[in-house]
Amino acid sequence: MVKQLFGLYGASGFGQEILYWLRLELQKRADPSRIVFIDDGASKVELEGLAVMPYEEFLRQPEGVKWATIAVADAGIRQRIDSKLQADGIEQYPIRGDYTFVRGAILSEGSVLSAFVDITSNVKVGRCFHANTYSYVGHDCVIGDYVTFAPRVSCNGNVHIHDHAYIGTGAIIKQGTPDKPLVIGQGAVVGMGAVVTKDVPPGATVVGNPAKPLVRR
């Protein structure tokens, strides 16, 4: 078996969370490959028993086959890292937590699915999708690039979520219809526990039940 190098890009709490599943997968297949953290601004040189290094040092490592997984919550930073990885020909390794289910969905490169995530039929997902624990995506949904689901998001069928949207913990998105999907606009934020019953404009932040635009006083 060819020894490879797996880089978790982001020596943060989320990076440490998904490390467990990557380690477990390599152990199950007796893969001798090495794992490191990539972090361009980290002060530590070691974390969880693994080396922490800037990206340029990661590129200089001797392994001929390299993979990366982006463990960064900020969608804008995730996009910039994704562009850098593509330019350097570094493929992204998908992470799948315990008891994840993907049934008839198409996922683009860079997805990270935590434990108990359920993605159902006829779903299309863009690049670098992060879905945290117990999140659900119903049938016929379309999810754009760099979208983030916090834990326990319920996205029911026929919903279109555009690029860079953030869906907060426990949010529920009402089901749309084939002729009129419910739309979450680009860069929109759905607050924790919000119940979304109608379209959310691009860049808007909505909160409450039913979800309404956040009014800052």
Image (cartoon, rainbow, N blue to C red):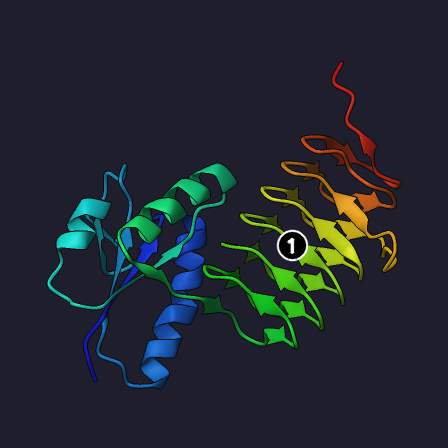
* 127 with respect to 123 (left or right): left
User: What crowding class fits label 1: few (fewer than 14 Cα within 10 Å), some (14-19), or many (20 or more)?
Assistant: many
Give the image location of residue 184, x and y in percent.
73, 43
Which quadrant, please, contains the N terminus? bottom left
Quarter placement of the C terminus: top right
The correct choice, above or below, for 14 with respect to 165 in the image is below
User: In this figure, which residue is indicated by the disc labeled 1?
Assistant: 143
Residue 76: horizontal and vertical position, in percent? 48, 37
Q: Is residue 206 visible?
A: yes
Q: Is residue 189 left or right of residue 111?
A: right
Residue 209 lies, in percent from the top left, at 87, 41
Q: Amino acid at mark 1?
A: Ile
Q: Which residue occupies 68% across, 49% down?
A: 169
Q: Residue at x 59, y 48 (%)?
A: 147
Q: Is residue 82 above or below residue 137?
A: above
Tell which of 89 and 111 is nearer to you: 89
Label 1: which secondary element: strand
